[in-house]
Amino acid sequence: MEVSIDESLATGCNGIYTFRADGSIYHSIGSLLPNENSRPRREDIPSCKLIIKEQQPNQRQYNLPTASQIAAVIVDNECSYNLSSRDIIIQGIGGHLMNIQDIVGYYDPLQYPLLLPYGTYGWDTNSRNNDGSRVTCLNYYAYMLQIRENSSSLLLRGGRLLQQYVVDNYVKIETHRLRWIHTNQSNIRSDLYQGLQDCLNGGENNAGNVGHGIVLPSTFVGSPRDMYQRYQDAMTLVQTYGKPDLMITMTCNPNWHEIKEQLLLGKSPQDRPDLITRIFKIKFDEFKKDVVDRGVLGRVRSYSYVIEYQKRGLPHVHMLVIFDNIDKRREGMRVVSNNNDQVIIDNGWVVPYNPWLLLKYDCHINVEVCGGIKCVKYIYKYIHKGPDRVALELRNRQNCDEIQQYVDGRWIFPPEALWRIYSFEFSRMYPSVIRLQIHLPNEQLIRFNPEQSLGYILANDDNSKTMLTEFFKMNSNPTMVEKYLYREFPQHYAWIQSGKKWTRRRSQNKFVGRIYVVSPSEEVLPPYTFEPC
């Protein structure tokens, strides 16, 4: 770290010298390029280049960044099982070098001495609350990055150093979660119910020797499986309520007075990504109340939205709205103007906007009427395309690993990192879609602990119960007067996972059922087709 003597304080006074520290911590490795009469550190350094390549225009995940912000690119050049900690080396007082992990408490004060001048410990695996309960990495940094009344946080005054702190620690959070999923593959097994029966009849009683590992599940928000399932859920709403009527895009305005009045002199909105994140969340919540609850554009029957960034430095949201039949819009009529040359004017010439929304929210809000049915799949695939990515490296890989595909080339920058640290919703749809299992008799997928015996697993009746089997059981009851199709059942009954049973709904909330896709051309159905991740 570079330091300098502050002579304005030390000159003419008795006592110790005053040093001012500036900049970030770097490893002293000497010059990468060769000096005169010396060898270079690496022979290939002069020819090395790190290039972010822009992909095809239809691959918007790979757009080049346009904002001047500190970002992280999560890249793992090795196999997926090498989701190891970063290579961090420190030099002790005695001069010896040692490796440390980023999940130890003293990593933060060593990496960010300007933000933590008193050596405040960061999160580690032994962090506890006052009541002794364990504190997760996500909860710890969400607490550290809060805006508190009548309190001046040095962290939030860090400018670009704050950006680095936020991105660095979010990468720590997500890498820790991915590492846990990958290292616990052998602790969570799955197989068909009939497959376990066959193994037991064949003399195998050790559950650890059968079954398949669980890949990156859809419960991991933003994963390819998660985005695909959300797309299928959204198309189920289209099947139920019809095509969307409006596609609304709302973009954060960095010049909102709520952001400007909180900035220190000489600071820009980019120096406070926490303000950008929180103010946009508040504005969007009010926007949802106007559109959905108050019905300023019409009575809403269904909606879905996704928060995006696209490397522009500011969050924005895509929202698809389906109105009640009475409030549905009609296509605009073409107008022909004959002034010297014949010009045909249609909806393509119109800038879609709503003046009332623009005046109230003071930001870019695009309100566009959705066209024919052909564009429906494109719109839903567009808003569920997944997180931002960059193309840093091209290489052939023979083994396909879903976790490796997800972390390779992901682009993360401060507003997105803070949105995830604060646990704000990235997407939502209404009504909620209930995903329904489907399987052949005795071929339901079950999950089990490999430490248990096969006899114990098969003796547990709950392992043979699924949404489908209990649906047939409910309909076989002669006292049940109302008969519903399988996909209609979630509208009237709720599935209790802990008790493996359907119960009558008491709330007035709406739900839509969706059966997992099964191809009729598949003779043998793979286990993962029916996995309700």
Image (cartoon, rainbow, N blue to C red):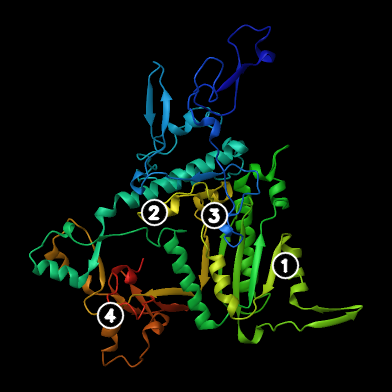
At horizontal 39% and vertical 43% (from top left) the residue drawn is 129
Q: Earlier in the sequence, mark 2 or mark 1?
A: 1
Q: Is residue 94 left or right of residue 262?
A: left
Q: Is residue 87 left or right of residue 310?
A: left
Q: Which mark is residue 470?
A: 4
Q: Which mark is residue 388?
A: 3
Cα separation between marks 1 and 3: 28 Å
> Which class describes the residues within 10 Å of circle 3: few (<14), some (14-19), or many (20+)?
some
Q: Are discs 4 and 3 less than 8 Å apart at CB?
A: no
Q: Nearer the viewer, residue 160 or 87?
A: 87
Q: Earlier in the sequence, mark 1 or mark 3?
A: 1
Q: Nearer the viewer, residue 347 or 342?
A: 342
| Amino acid type of the residue that numbered disc 2 sits on in the rendered structure | Ile
Q: Which mark is residue 403?
A: 2
Depth check, mark 2 against mark 1: the one in front is 2
Which residue matches tag 1?
A: 357
Instruction: Provide residue 214's location: percent of width, then percent of height.
Output: 31, 59
Cα separation between marks 4 and 2: 34 Å
> Which class describes the residues within 10 Å of circle 4: few (<14), some (14-19), or many (20+)?
some
Q: Residue furthest right?
A: 340
Instruction: Provide residue 312's location: percent of width, then percent of height.
Output: 64, 52
Cα separation between marks 2 and 1: 41 Å
Cα separation between marks 3 and 2: 16 Å
Cα separation between marks 4 and 3: 41 Å
Depth check, mark 4 against mark 3: the one in front is 3
**Residue 152 visible in the displayed image:** no
**Residue 191 visible in the displayed image:** yes
Q: Are discs 1 and 3 less than 8 Å apart at CB?
A: no
Quarter of the image with the C terminus in it? bottom left
